[in-house]
Image (cartoon, rainbow, N blue to C red):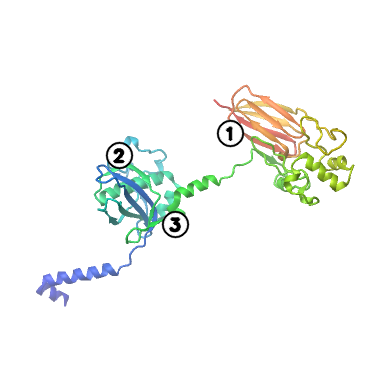
Amino acid sequence: MLDDLAESDPQAYGKFLSSQMEGAKEAAPKAETRPAFCMQCQLKKPTTPLPIFINVTHCQEVAEAYRDESAKEQKVKVPGLDDKSADDKGDDDLTGMRIPIARTKETPSSDPKVPSVYEVAVNSLVVLRAAKDPAFKRMLEMTVMAAAAQFFKLDLSPNYTMASEKFKGDKTEPVLLSPLQKRGPGGGAGMKGQESAGEGAKAKKPLIQEMGPNAASAGSKGAKDGGKTGGVGTGGKGGGNRDGASEGASSQPLKSLQTPEALLESLRNRNGTGGCASSVEAEDGHLNLPSSGTAPKGTGGGGKVLIEEVVTEPEYRLEVRGEQLVLTVEMPLAGGVGEMDLIVSEREVSVKSYHYSLKVALDTSVDSDGVSAKFNKKSKCLVLKLPVIS
């Protein structure tokens, strides 16, 4: 029947085929795109002061990025961009990489108060990779600019910024969404915030690491070690509370036990009047008192110091091994890293604990940020490795 129609009335046959194709096109499911990021651009010769937005969306229907093995070098040409100004560092692994870009819609504006928005789409996996790889993200942005300039006949300036707006890519009028309302897969739409949050969440390792059979449980021995839970860092004290808070004998707030005066008062209440000194000896064997030598208030005895601390300089040796200095400090009475303070500057190392105090002047400059320190609880030795600044 169609053959007869094609022979008798070719024009009607052509209209019939066109109507069938249009109907199939309308019936075909549309790809649902989701917002990824938005670029704020300018024309080289703008007619209005308003910027141009290139809305980048993503969906599974767009082809994935692939590598063209026959290409020797991948360079995305952006109109007006000087090749010398492009930052190609770290892009060696992107040689020959191709990122398919699909044209979705354009919303040019004739209103001087409303900016024009042009939309393109990429594969969802491309957005995920761009969120993790800064070099790939830079390449994606340049590819999007080149594609938008070609698709929509735009004479774009090479300068652009990442817009804070996110546009909903649903083939309708663009609707502004906040980053909290709409995100790409795995947070791809808000990748800036995600990267910054990831860097801020990184915890810094303690400068001194304990070595030995009890190193794993060193932080949980509150009652056994007298509650010494202070941290270790490159400055400041790492003492912590020394009243054995886990015993629960005192009903005072924790803050009231942070001073020697409050500690003595707590011990007096626990053991009765006159039992203060023996309680201190039974708990730790010594007490941190003010360096002036005066007794805390309420201790009695007319200002007499109950227990005096004896601080000595430990034995140490300094060796040169390759491009680093190795400082070994013998500390037989040290209980752990919780009672040590380590301060490293460019020309000096300072180690302090309840029993020891050591300052070592260095003949050469060291990198204080690259220092590593380990305390071996079996040999009671603190080993510091100090990288030399060449």
**Left or right position of 16 against 227:** left
Outermost residue, left side? 8
Please tell me which residue is depicted at 31% across the width and 41% down the height of the picture.
158
For the residue marked with disc 3, what is the amino acid?
Answer: Pro
Identity of the residue furthest to the top in this view: 363
Of callouts 3 and 1, which one flags the residue occurring earlier in the amino acid sequence?
3
- Depth check, mark 3 against mark 1: the one in front is 3
Q: Which residue is mark 1?
A: 370
**Label 2 crowd (10 A; few <14 / some 14-19 / many >=20):** some
Query: Helix, strand, or loop for circle 2?
Result: loop
- From the top left corner, tell me how far across and down residue 123 is, in percent: 37, 55
Residue 370 seen in render: yes
Q: Tag 2 or tag 3, which sits nearer the N-term?
A: 2
| Nearest the eye: 153 or 175 | 175
Amino acid under label 1?
Gly
Crowding at mark 3 (Cα within 10 Å: few <14, some 14-19, many 20+):
some
Label 1: few (<14), some (14–19) or many (≥20) C-alpha neighbours in 10 Å: few
Residue 119 found in image quarter? bottom left
Q: Position of residue 333 (x, y in %)?
A: 78, 35
Give, as a three-letter code, the residue at label 2: Leu
Q: Which residue is mark 2?
A: 81
As helix, strand or loop, the secondary structure at mark 1 comes to helix
Question: Depth check: 187 or 373 in front?
Answer: 187
- For image coordinates 26% across by 49% down, the residue present is 150
Q: Position of residue 159 (x, y in %)?
A: 33, 41
